[in-house]
Image (tube, rainbow, N blue to C red):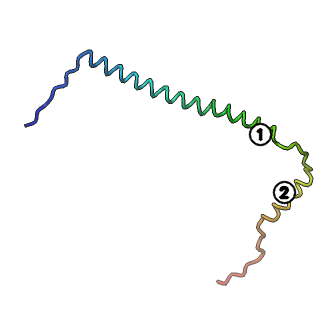
């Protein structure tokens, strides 16, 4: 024998459930807003402060751009693969 229990929804219970749902939605929205603000504003501000601190610690030496470009070009020439001029095919 299955006993069906009838749900009694009184205006007071409905009001309480509605209030609970509203509070839950507000908490979720506030969580998303605070996470957005943390990621997009607070972290950006702290990274900017770190960049300013690092700029003060960087050595202020002039670089000879001709020598720098020469070294970069030599490194690039070493990396470039050599072309194979003629390959004898074993299948001909």
Question: Tag 1, which secondary structure?
Answer: helix
Image location of residue 58, percent across then percent down: 82, 42
Name the quadrant containing residue 77: bottom right
- Numbered label tally: 2
Closer to us: 59 or 85 = 59
Question: Tag 2, which secondary structure?
Answer: helix
Vertical comparison of 9 with 82: above or below: above
Image point 64% across, 34% down: which residue? 43
Q: Nearer the viewer, mark 2 or mark 1?
A: 1
Q: Quick check: 4 left or right of 36?
A: left
Image location of residue 84, percent across then percent down: 76, 73
Vertical comparison of 57 with 81: above or below: above
User: Residue 72 shows which numbered tag?
Assistant: 2
| Quarter of the image where the C terminus is located | bottom right
Residue marked by disc 1? 54
Image location of residue 38, percent across then percent down: 59, 31
Vertical comparison of 78 with 45: above or below: below
Name the quadrant containing residue 91: bottom right
Image point 16% across, 26% down: which residue? 6
Closer to us: 17 or 90 = 17
Q: Between marks 2 and 1, how big is the CA–CA gap?
A: 26 Å
Name the quadrant containing residue 14: top left
Image location of residue 40, percent across then percent down: 61, 32
């Amino acid at each position: 024998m299955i006993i069906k229990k009838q749900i009694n929804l009184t205006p007071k219970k409905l009001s309480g459930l509605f209030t609970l749902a509203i509070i839950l939605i507000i908490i979720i929205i506030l969580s998303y807003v605070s996470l957005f603000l943390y990621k997009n504003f607070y972290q950006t501000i702290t990274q900017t402060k770190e960049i300013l601190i690092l700029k003060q610690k960087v050595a202020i030496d002039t670089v000879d751009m001709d020598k720098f470009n020469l070294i970069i070009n030599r490194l690039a020439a070493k990396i470039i693969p050599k072309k194979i001029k003629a390959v004898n095919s074993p299948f001909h």
